[in-house]
Amino acid sequence: MPYGWVQVTGWEQTVQLVTSSGTNLIMLPAAILAWQYKTPIDSVIFLFTIATSAVYHATQTLNASIFRGDHGKWHQADNIFAISTFMNIILLVAQLEDEQLLTCVKLCGLCVITVMQLLSPWDIDYTISPIVLTVVCVAVYRAAFVRKLPEVVPRNAVWGLVSLVCAVVCYSKGLDDEHDYLRLWHSCWHAFIGIAAWHAIKAFTPPALLASRVRRVEAVKKAALVAPFVRKPTGTGDASGQSAVQNAYLCECCEGRGCVVGESC
């Protein structure tokens, strides 16, 4: 296994523990923002990235086991969610409006990454290939189906790109565990990728897309509240077999504000 770091003790161990584990919290604002932007899967994956990476570096620094897992096992878990985080950040560029399709893509990606990491966690091909495949799929989707560049918020896009470049440089430097004193390069990778994730969400979630997500969520919430009080249709048409929640979600006459099909908007 690719472990070549120097085990430190005393004050150096304390500093390494704080930097290598604590810097993962810089991803927390991105997780909160993803939840606010109605992408709960991203939020959950970001949170698990924070947790698994923090525990991995704690077990590594302290040479200990947590929940019966040593640093090797926690490193595997960290790899799964770190790669998933990268994939979901790239998927932001696609700006998919079909939430069901987007959820399916993200869950399939997480499943594929999990299998790959269980089969061969230290194989660089299994680490890079899901990310490269995601880039190719997003590029093909934008070129073949959308046929235009994604809408971006320029300021966030620039800061996100700068942060990403810094993150990649720090990650590359940190691969040399033996010479990464106190894992400082790797800690900087945590910091910059957390900043890049926050800016990416801001940059590639245009107001129209965010507004659409909010309307859909509010429509379902409203329908769930009024469903017990709505008299269901008794006819034999398609609407008769649908619940009030489904009807509210499908109604387009009020742009998804939650009216029931067949009722006045």
Image (tube, rainbow, N blue to C red):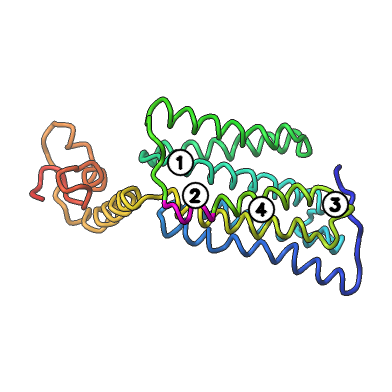
The residue labelled by disc 3 is 177
- Looking at the image, residue 144 sits to the left or right of residue 17; the answer is left
Amino acid found under the numbered disc labelled 4: Cys
Up the image or down, 231 lies above or below 54; here it is above
Mark 4 or mark 1, which has the lower sequence index?
1
Q: Secondary structure at mark 1?
A: helix
* Vertical placement of residue 10 versus 171, above or below: below
The residue singled out by tag 2 in the image is: 41
Q: Residue at x 51, y 40 (%)?
A: 106
- Per the image, label 4 sits on a secondary structure element best described as helix
The tag earlier along the polypeptide, 3 or 2, is 2
Amino acid type of the residue tagged 3 in the rendering: Asp
Closer to the chain start, of discs 2 and 4, is: 2
Sequence-earlier tag: 2 or 1: 2
Amino acid type indicated by mark 2: Ile
Who's the residue at 91% across and 69% down the image? Answer: 9
> What amino acid is found at the position of numbered circle 1 in the picture?
Thr
| Mark 4 crowd level (few <14, some 14–19, many ≥20, 10 Å Cα) | some
